Image (spheres, rainbow, N blue to C red):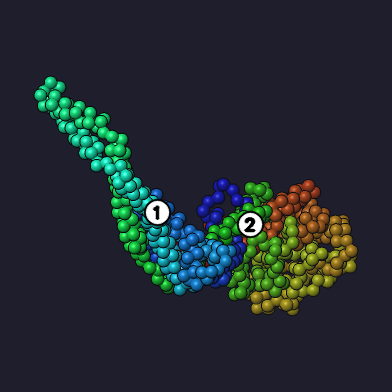
Amino acid sequence: MPLSTELTLQDYWRIIHRRKLALIVVWGTTVLATMIFTAIQTPLFQAEGTVRIEPTASIPGMSTVNQWDIWALMNTEVKSIRSTKVAERAAILLGDIDVNAPQDARFQAANGIQTQIKADRIGDSNLLKLSGTSDNPARAAALVNAMMEAYIQKGMEERNRKARESREFTEQEMAKAETKLRTAEDNLKLYSEKSGAKGVGSYLTGQFVNLQTKLQELRRSYTETHPEVVRVKSQIEIVEGQIRQLPEEEIELQRLTREVRINEELYTFLSKKFKEAQIEESQKEQYAFIDSPALVPQAPIRPNKGMNMSIGLLAGLFFGITIALILENLDTSIGTIEDVEQQIGLPVLAVVPHIPTSKSERRKIPLAPLRFMKPATVEENRMRLAFYHPPSSSFIEAYHTLRTNLRIPLERAQNKPGAAIAFTSAGVSEGKTLTAVNFALTAAQGGLKTMLIEADTRRPTAHKLLGVTREPGLTDCVLGNANWQMSRGTTDFLLGDLDIDKILKSPGIENFRFLPCGRSPLNPADVLGSPKMTTLLQDLRKNFDLIVLDCPPVMLFADTLLIGPKMNGVILVYQAGRTARGALKRAKDQLLNVKSSVIGVILNNLHSAEMEPHYGSYYYNYKYYSHESEDASKV
């Protein structure tokens, strides 16, 4: 049945039930592939460790004001801990490479370690989580610990390098300051001895500075006419005059003295900084610490067998259902009674359920489409004859339903001449022969004098089912080599291959006659379409209430098209999933084109999965009770 937007949940369940073999195969294949994939994967172990970052408040030689941005710093350290330099150090600590290894080997080893390491910041803290993966659990833990140790060593060396560079720079500058100071002191001493200057200029200059300071303080409290302000001004004028009268020797001496004092102050400052740098360098400052070392993992992180199998089970179920729906959509056959009546335009006269013939067949899962399945053997079909089933079974009830739906042509059979009905199908292996034989048997059980004719001379099987010989038969009667009175009856069946007990227990067997096909003619179509065939049918109508013909498939041979107009009606036998709906409709149209009366369709050999839920429940769950004492409410 092609999928449509009007499908109900029951339709989907029926589709899944019909295609359960495909679903199970896809599901099993997916699960098996998942198991194989999981089994061939190399176990992967993961170890984790944490590093704590504690930045210092100052860097040697720089300002003590800390402008530390924790967010930017931690993001930087996440990248830094996985850097190539750290990975190279870790490779050396692990013994993967030697300290003197060439740069290419160092880079290759570092690159291999970087692919196995992941670093992340833990929340908003100053902790870094380092994860290492390897197929060896001990290697995974050693890898993480080596990376953390290498990271700490690298950080300490970088911090100490800055302290060392600051100490070296300060030491160089201090040496320069000392040289300048010595030169200034030598110049001052040499000039003092040579010029004989006493340093009066320095005294006067100091006095002048002091008076200027005192004047500024007085002006904050007094006016310019205040006696004290006037007195200080006059003293400043006197000192200025004295300074102007100083000799050049005193001025030069004053300059040299000032130069010595400046160089002394610079040398003292650099000496202090040099001592600080030495202290910083000797401390070997560390700002990263191992908070939690990596431990050897006990279980692999991949493959996760539980998760893989869960995904495989769910994916297999999904793919299986998808394939089942796709197969159903691609299937051009007709699956339900409503589909047949709507698309073919013919009534469904009966639904013949599938009857398993053995325990092994009961365990089989029906495939759809069935056109790819092997047809049932003669022995299997023989077990489906009406002889082998009680009259009250659902299987025989289907043929009673067919006879009831054919009551109009059968009522005509009560008044001579009798009715002739042909059974055919669109394609092969749809069960038309078995259906025709069982219908003829049930009609005979119902009291109708019935003649079954094996009109399929191309692939005759009816005589095999009934266990009798095929010659002489229909072709011999048409060719005038025999007459229909030699048709097989009860005695022939008892002497044939059928179970004698089953035949004797079958009611109405005396009303049943069988005319086999006879020998195969060169052109079967000429035999069935000949006037002698018409004469034979007229003769049979006078002697039987019902004539049932088993005819070849319509789409393969023209035999049924030739004999169809001579029948009171033609019935198409259709097995769901065996033939496309287009072929069934084409068979109907061809019969109508030759003026045949197409009565309806029989859905044959239907499994419960192929039937609508209410039909399947009826055919497979409804039971008769043989004793009146049974509780009728259970029926």
Q: Which of disc 2 and disc 1 is earlier in sequence?
A: 1
Foreground pick, 622 / 608: 608
**Relative to 215, residue 329 above or below:** below
Splitting the image into 4 quarters, where does residue 323 fall?
bottom right
| Residue 113: x %, y % from top left | 51, 65
Which residue, given by chain and number where applicable, does mark 1 sit on? Answer: 172
Foreground pick, 171 / 392: 171
Q: Residue at x 50, y 72 (%)?
A: 95
Give SS at disc 1.
helix
- 1 vs 2, front mark: 1
Which residue, given by chain and number where applicable, does mark 2 sit on? Answer: 327
In the picture provided, is 589 more to the left or to the right than 622? right
Q: Residue at x 68, y 77 (%)?
A: 499
Q: Which label was assigned to residue 71? A: none
| Residue 40: x %, y % from top left | 57, 71
Q: Are marks 1 and 2 in contact (CB under 8 Å)?
A: no
Q: What amino acid is found at the position of numbered circle 2 in the picture?
A: Leu
Foreground pick, 431 / 375: 375
